[in-house]
Amino acid sequence: MNRFRCIPLLGLSATLLTLAACSVRAAGPSVELKGHKFDVEIAADEPSRTRGLMFRDSMADDHGMLFVFDDAQPRAFWMKNTHIPLDILFFDQDYKLVSVQQRVPPCRSDPCSTYPSTGPTKYVLELNSGMADKLGVKAGDPISVKQ
């Protein structure tokens, strides 16, 4: 995560202020859905989209991963090497929810099942399993993305 650049200053009070500023993390990207904010990792290139949330054993409830594609088309995701169950939310080019794959389990054997969108998708948000139900999402719900 990005941090503020720390510049050493002379004097005790200046040093304390510098240390306080250094401990504050810079705001990263986030999305808002149904009034809830999620800090997200962005997967906008092929290597990061391929890796996704693989090999993670947990994820904070207020975190997720946002996959960004160059175009809108039907998409399918799989859970190979993903250790945590997820909700996969598919959004169109206008940031409107197209469809949701809920409570998608980790893949335990090859070949892994795929989980498709029901229409063209440009953005995909992965959240912890059960979050879509908790938020009460439905087709057409908008998402806002903040960098």
Image: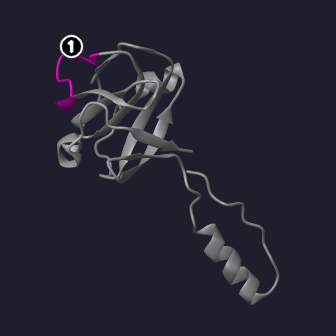
The answer to whether 43 appears left or right of 20 in the picture is left
**Vertical comparison of 78 with 63: above or below:** above
The colour scheme applied to this rendered structure is one colour
Residue ID for mark 1: 110
Picture quarter containing residue 65?
Answer: top left
Q: Is residue 146 magenta?
A: no
Residue at point 45%, 42% (across, down): 144
**Which residue in the rendered view is the most extreme toward the right?**
10
**Which residue in the rendered view is the most extreme toward the bottom?**
12
Q: Is residue 105 magenta?
A: yes
Asked if one can make out residue 129 in the rendered structure from this viewpoint, the answer is no
Q: Main secondary structure of the magenta part?
A: loop
Q: Position of residue 6 (x, y in %)?
A: 72, 65
* Mark 1, secondary structure of its residue: loop
Q: Position of residue 78 (x, y in %)?
A: 28, 20
Q: Position of residue 61 (x, y in %)?
A: 29, 52
Task: Assign the C terminus to one quadrant of the image.
Answer: top right
**Vertical comparison of 33 with 55: above or below:** below
**Vertical comparison of 109 with 144: above or below:** above
What is the magenta range?
101-118
- Rate crowding at label 1 as few (under 14), some (14 to 19) or many (20 or more) other CA atoms within 10 Å: few
Name the amino acid type tagged 1: Asp
Q: Position of residue 87 (x, y in %)?
A: 24, 35
Residue at point 49%, 42% (across, down): 145
The answer to whether 42 appears left or right of 127 in the picture is right
Residue at point 17%, 42% (across, down): 133
